[in-house]
Every structure is written in C-alpha cells, then in structure tokens.
Amino acid sequence: MKIKQLLLAPVALSMVAPVVASATEFNLTEVNRYATAEQAISINQFSDVKSTDWAYIALQSLVERYGCVAGYSNGTFGGGRAMTRFEAAALLNACLDRVTEVTDELTRLAEEFRNELTVIQGRVSKLETKVGALESTQFSTTTKLKGEATFVLGGVDGARLANGTDVGNTAFNYDVRLNFDTSFTGKDLLKTRLRSGNFSSQPFGSSSSLFKLDKSESTSNAVQLDRLYYTFPALAKGVTLTAGALVRNTEMSWVPTAYKSDILDFFAVAGAPGVYNKATGAGFGIQYAQPTKKGGSGFVAGVNYVAQNGSDSTKGEFDDSGALNLLAQVGYRAPQYGVALGYRYGTEGTRIRTFNGVAGNGGTLVAGQTSNNYAINAYWQPKNSGIIPSVSGAYGWNDVSTNASGNATPNAATNSKTWFAGLQWSDVFAKGNSAGFAIGQPGNAETLSEDALMWEAFYRYRVSNNITITPSVFYVSNNQGLKNASSNYGGVIQTTFRF
C-alpha cells in the first residue's frame, strides 16, 4: 500500500507544484473541505471549468473516475488561482484515501474468491500443458485435415447391360476423401487429396453412365492420389492462379447453379456436361472475381487448361492426343442470382459426361476428333427460405467434328444438346434441411430417334453439422447404355460424414 501511495504522490505534487503559494496564504476552512465535504461526482458541477481548458481531461478523470476532488463552497474549482501547500496536501490525501479504499476492496474480493481463483488458475495451467503437448505432436502448423466419407445404399430397377449382365441389384458402397489443405501465407492453398471407393462402373461408377453419381469412385478399395494442385493470389486484386499435376477444370471455374443435390452427376454439373465435364489431369488456370464487400455482387471470369494425359510422355501436355481441355467462362454473380456463359474446347480422349449414345456412339472423342462445347446457365434464389424455391436452368450444345478421315465412325462422338431445370427449397420441415426436384435432357447422340429424359427428387436431412442423410429417387428414359434402351427407376440413400 505504501509503495502505491509513494508512486502516486510525485504525480499529484507535480500537477500542483506550478501553482503552489506560500504557507501564509492558505485558507484553513477551504482545506478542511477535502476532509469533511462530499466529493464532486461530475466535472459539470464546477461552473468555472470548460472543456477547452488544457487540464480538462485530467481533472475529469480525478473527479468522475477517482472521486477525490471537492472544489470550493461557491461551486467553483478555482483552476486559475494559486494553491497553498496545505491545499495540495489535502487534495493528495483525499486521492490516496480513494486509492486505499479501492485497493482494500480488491484485496477483500481476492480473499473472498480465493478458492475459485485457485481452481481457475489450476485449469489454466492444465490447458497450457495440453496446448503445449498438442503443439509438440501436431501433424503440421500449416496443414489442416478435412475428411468426407459417403455411404450409398441403392440400385436401379431392372438395369441390364447389352450383354445381359444384371446391374440393377441393390448395393452398399462407399466413397472416402481425405483432404490435406496447406496454407503458407493464409491466402494460398496447396490441395492434396486421397480417395478410395468400391463402386462398380455400372450403374453408378462410370462417367459414361446416365446413372453416374456425383460421389462415386471405382478404385477397387485402393487409395489413390486424387488431387494435387496449388492456388494463390497474384498479379492483381481478385486474381487467382492455379497450377497442379492433378487438378479438375470445374475446381478452377464457377459452376453457376443454386441446385445442389449431390446425387446424379448430370445435375451436379448444372446440366452442362459438355462444358463442365470434370476433366482431371495436369493443368493450370487463372480466375478473376471482382473485389466486393462480403455478400456483394460482381463479375467473374476465367480460363483454365487441363491435359488428362499430360503425365504420359508418349502423349504429353500439349499434344492433341493428350486429351486437352480448354475451358473459358464469363459471368456475373450476386447473392440472389447468377448467370454465366461457358465454352470448352476438347481434343481426342476428352469426353462429354453422361452421354447417351447408340450403336457404339459414346461421349468420348476418338482420334482426329475435336469438340466445341457451349453452355449458358442462370439461377435465382429467394432471400429467405419459405415456400418459394430457388430456380436453376441451363442449355448446352456440343459441336463435334468428324474423325481424321472425314467420316463419323461407329465409336465416334456426335453433336448433341442438353438442358436442365431445377427447383430447390431450403429449411424444409426444419432448419438446415433441404429438398429439390430437377429434370433435364442429357447429351443424346444426334442419330437417336428418341431422346432420353432424366429427373430426380431428393430430401436432405441434416442430422448434425457433420452428418447428413439424403434419400433420393430418379428416372431415366431411353437409356442406350442399357439393354433394349430401357427406361428405369432408381434410388439411393446417401449418408455423408464430414470431419
């Protein structure tokens, strides 16, 4: 206590020293007011103190924070008059008394809550020990592990391949993805992803199947490196560059849709499988998003290049036989709506996903073929959840050249058109749950006498922040990938765990 008083005394004396008068001029009555009168509680009680006075802030603190200034009986502070040493001593004593009162109160509270403070101190010490142990054993200071495990129980009624093989039985499959997200600056990302799955190619695992699921992979239970790329800001504000040995074109562009069921692959690429064809391989890209405030509107644009066979030295990164994909996009994105134009150029080995071919016509380009694929997508979504759903739509057309000899072969891809429309409701029956319905036409070979039609309906139930269950039913007509170009219903129960 004495130490605090000694520290405060020089401060107070230095304030009053310039105006100290001789001891013979003091007024004992006024000095006694500091010991007997009530202290002022507001600086406004002093009629002669103005906010423009040079010591206004200091005086306000002494009055309103510490309550150790009383002033004179006429309601003034007398800031301009000389001060006797006796008055200075009385003022200093009043302030020291207030400090003593506050300090005594803090000491009493500390004593009263000594047990609680001891418990808290012990808990903090334990937390510090645990944090130290975690820091010493953590995987990395720059890398975060994010995982996703998907269970799929489902099948397609009566689905049979052209050779008669029954592929319509109910199966229970999985798809697991482990993402190692590394950032060195806080604004960049090195993506490394491992993936494993046990789906059969038909009906759910192959990108040529109209029943291809968005989350299905055929690795025969083996773990594979699925992504490896680096994204970083550069050149100008809003510009992002990406380069990688295993990168996907849809991850370097914006898929413009508000419909997100995560069930059938055709609807996952917003009904434009010719442009947003999920080409994966060695590549690079540049993307621009107009800088705006969070939740604002702005233009987006980008171009990316992926060689699906870029790691194969017999084909290479830039040779036409390397399955080259050049995707360009321009659009406008707002909180409630968006629109985009997309274009992709492809060479032999690239494909139009979920393509409905006939007599050997598939979605994959053969030697000598190239394709020019176009799409326009748009969506709108309500500001608040309710009875009004989001609306998404797309139209795409795929212009495919003939083969090298100038003639279309039975195995060559052909021209086609696609379209899709989707409705999705949010917070259905409970917050976080959603439901939707989509219908569309996949890429049908131009030689087909009857085009295929697809639809799906789903309900996503959010069990927790990390678990969702999505039952879904779907239908495809005139599926040329199945025996007798059959029309089939299917359904899955998809459970996703994120960690």
Image (cartoon, rainbow, N blue to C red):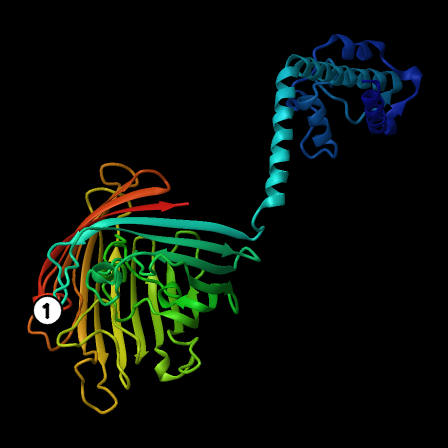
Task: Indicate the position of residue 348 as horizontal and vertical percent values.
Answer: 30, 81
Residue beneath disc 1: 451
Task: Indicate the position of residue 455 as horizontal and vertical percent values.
Answer: 15, 57
Residue 426 shows up from this direction: no
Q: Which residue is most to the bottom?
A: 405
| Left or right of 191 on screen, residue 481 | left
Q: Which residue is drawn at 48% across and 50% down?
A: 145
Q: Which picture quadrant has residue 259?
A: bottom left
Q: What residue type is labelled 1?
A: Asp
Task: Indicate the position of residue 28 as horizontal and vertical percent values.
Answer: 85, 10
Residue 62 vs 135, above or below: the answer is above
| Left or right of 307 on screen, residue 215 | left
Residue 200 vs 430, above or below: the answer is below
Residue 322 vs 120, above or below: the answer is below
Q: Which picture quadrant has residue 205?
A: bottom left
Q: Residue at x 63, y 34 (%)?
A: 128
In front: 26, or 189?
A: 189
| Left or right of 422 on screen, residue 77 | right
* SS of the residue under disc 1: loop
Q: For the C terminus, which image quadrant?
A: top left
Q: Residue at x 57, y 57 (%)?
A: 185
Q: For the N terminus, which image quadrant?
A: top right
Residue 462 shows up from this direction: yes
In front: 390, or 411?
A: 411
Q: Residues within 10 Å of mark 1 (few under 14, many from 20)?
A: some
Task: Indicate the position of residue 241 as horizontal and vertical percent values.
Answer: 48, 68
